[in-house]
Image (cartoon, coloured by chain):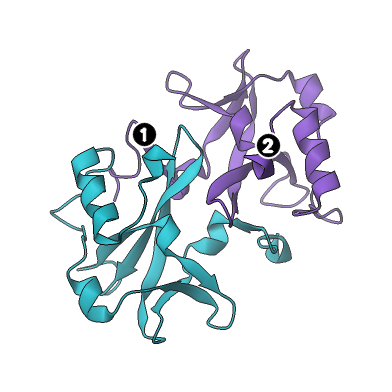
Chain colours: A cyan, B purple
Amino acid sequence: MEKLDETASLISSGKVMGTGVYNTAGDSLGEIHDVMIDKQSGRIAYAVMSFGGFLGIGERYHPLPWVTLKYDTRQGGYVVGLTREQLQGAPTFGGQEPPAWGDRAYERRIHDYYSAPPYWGL
Amino acid sequence: MEKLDETASLISSGKVMGTGVYNTAGDSLGEIHDVMIDKQSGRIAYAVMSFGGFLGIGERYHPLPWVTLKYDTRQGGYVVGLTREQLQGAPTFGGQEPPAWGDRAYERRIHDYYSAPPYWGL
């Protein structure tokens, strides 16, 4: 399915994974590690962006509300409207700190940080 | 993220891929090869189910509207309300016949076959 994994309207999750994430200044922030699907609505809740680490060791993850990502064809990746500094204060997980998927207080903190509308209210 | 790829409400696309698909009689129909995401809404449009073939040769794919799949914890896989015979007449693609993602007439045939509401009207 080499050439069938993306059209103007659809993209395969396989193609999304590994795609780079940049800020509006063009700085590389990380890449998409996985996407979390809301089972009930079939809607993507989060893109999980990985950054740092080496061969998976010391790697940390940013859960980004899907609505914060805009695909930029010129950049060939997703763009989020955040500086590196803003991202440093953003919620992360990894290693000993697992994400609390499904915990509304946890998820609300993530969405509030990015001023993103909650996926569960759509 | 071994144990963090699924909760009651969220599931990672990595976990969805490779998951078995069964009919209500418990027959194995195939497995999830990929999921196609509608970029605009962030909603899963299709699960692409692979079946047949060997090591990818001769394999064919069924695009299944996401809403037709119900996860069954007992079965440990997705269940669709179709007999094998019904599935044999269902839309497929593979090899020389690529899917026409984004072609509304093509997509409407798929959704009509499964009596599924179109994802683009949601």
The percent coordinates of residue A72 (x first, y second) are 54, 76
User: Which residue is identified by label 1?
Assistant: B9
Q: Measure the C-alpha gap from mark 2 to mark 1.
A: 21 Å
In the image: residue A54, left or right of residue B111: left
Foreground: A85 or B33?
Answer: A85
In the image, is residue A27 above or below residue B83?
Answer: below
What residue occupies the far top of the structure in this picture?
Answer: B25
| Secondary-structure class at tag 1 | loop
User: Which residue is identified by label 2?
Assistant: B64
Q: Give the residue displayed 58% in from the left and 29% down from the top.
A: B69
Q: Chain of mark 1?
A: B
Kind of residue sitting beneath label 1? Ser
Kind of residue sitting beneath label 2? Leu
Q: Give the residue displayed 80% in from the left and 29% down from the top.
A: B113
In the image: residue B34, left or right of residue B71: right
**Callout 1: few (<14), some (14-19), or many (20+) C-alpha neighbours within 10 Å?**
some
The percent coordinates of residue A10 (x first, y second) are 65, 56
